[in-house]
Image (cartoon, rainbow, N blue to C red):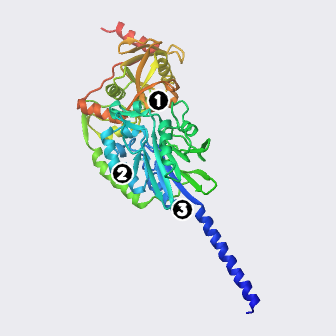
Amino acid sequence: MGSKESTLLFLLIMLICCHNNANEVNAQDTKKLTIIHTNDTHARVIEGKYDGMGFAKIATLIKQIKAQNENVIILDAGDTFHGQIFATLEKGSSIVKVLNQVGYDAMVLGNHDFNYGQKRLLELIQMADFDVISANIKYLDGRNFVSPYVIKKINDISVGVFGLTTPETAYMTHPNNVAGLCFDNPIEAAQNTVDDLKEKTDVIIALSHLGTDTNNEYSSKLVAKEVKGIDLIVDGHSHSVFPFGLKVKNTLIVSAGEYAKNLGVVHLNLDQKEKRVMARLITKSDACRTEEDIFIKKIIDTILSRQETILLQVIGESLTDLDGERENVRTKETNLGNLITDSMIYLTKAQAAIINGGGIRGSIDKGDITLGQIFTVLPFGNTVLTKKLKGRDIKKALEHGTSKYPKASGAFPHVAQMTYSIDLKRPVGNRIINIKIDGEAIDMDAEYIIATNDFIAAGGDHYKMFLNKETIHEYTALDEGLIEYIQMHQTIAPEIEERIHIIDELRLRHKYWAIFNSP
């Protein structure tokens, strides 16, 4: 090879080397962080028809994402420890075990995570291999209830994650669960925390259980608008679904809906010029062919097997059959409907209670009552809360719930400490008369504290008159309240008490005919 050819070859080699070195420098200059997130799963760890994809599939998806980028952080935006039998039977420890194995890095406290009480919540936090955080929950003396934030070092990326919990928690759980705690202004807490983190981290993420409902005093939208320096808000509480995120000023808000129906994925690129954020959701439909992680599935199946024994536990005895048959609870008063609403009065001390018959999904035979039977009757994990309604709103609720009578309707209202009549001679929408609360005629202009379930409170079954009404307190799950009520009494024998009276001209004729023709 001549000197000219050698020189050309040397220059070519140098050019290739310089090009490769330049690529290496560019690769080092650009850092990519992937954030995987869930929120408001409410203990839905198993794939179900009305629930999400289940955590065994989520675990598989996480492994697939990590195979593409090792810089991954896994976050949960709260309302995680409570909501289904899987969780409540073991007061949340079953959920912690699953999240530990999936590999979560951090979780913010949601309002429902307090449902087992402070003592149990702190026990669950001790069991967790991940950080449980919130910057705005304090003891009355000013101490933090949990760590306000955590700094995660993911290879050469320093990630600061801080938590925000809705101040609504003060009344969205039983008052005893938050005794001695206060919930500071999330905007002020966020800015103070960001100021503390900005010199220590490359990325700042707010893990927020505030929601994006603008009707609330505080929301993640308001945080994004008012607080400078947050790169990403992973949000929960309002069960919102943002397929590609919601941009507010310079901050992207992401939320994956509810019940693990979606898995949120955010890619955040860091370079010298700007931070670029891209968000997407992996839906249950997207994951339909995803195989379940064998290890996570085995953990869940082992817990379920153990719980089968617990479900056989006897909590009391009924001296009569408890009627929860579908055609009955959707058309008339039943003794089981009365029992459930009575337990709500016991739990809340409200002036009256209303639930929808469609929420009662089975009967219980005379004899021993087991935990499993209660969970079969009330399978939805609904919580009990109290709302302030005027008398006219209560009448609207009863008119609506009985509007299809005598046809069956899931909205049919069962009540406690309340009685009402349906006058079938009147037009639909004006058939409810003789409404009494605690034996006194209702005052249409007066305000009453009414216990109901969170389904109706959110406008379920088109109970729209409950929407935007003041919530006084939120309590435990409906099934837990019923269990406590039965355990307190041990032996029960609920009856039909004519809380709901049907005025039917034909029935009246038969009644009077029987009276006048009696011997």
Mark 2 closeness class: few <14, some 14–19, many ≥20 residues within 10 Å:
many
Amino acid at circle 1: Ile
**For mark 3, what is the residue?**
69
Percent coordinates x, y for residue 331 in the rendering: 44, 26
Percent coordinates x, y for residue 45 in the rendering: 42, 49
Q: Quadrant of the N terminus?
A: bottom right
Q: Is residue 66 above or below residue 364?
A: below
Under circle 2, the secondary element is loop
**For mark 2, what is the residue?**
128
Precedes in sequence: disc 2 or disc 3: 3
Precedes in sequence: disc 2 or disc 1: 2
Precedes in sequence: disc 3 or disc 1: 3
Q: Quadrant of the C terminus?
A: top left
The answer to which of 68 and 11 lies nearer the viewer is: 11
Q: Residue 490 vs residue 380: left or right?
A: left
**For mark 1, what is the residue?**
456
The answer to which of 355 and 323 lies nearer the viewer is: 355
Q: Residue furthest top?
A: 516
Q: Residue furthest right?
A: 4
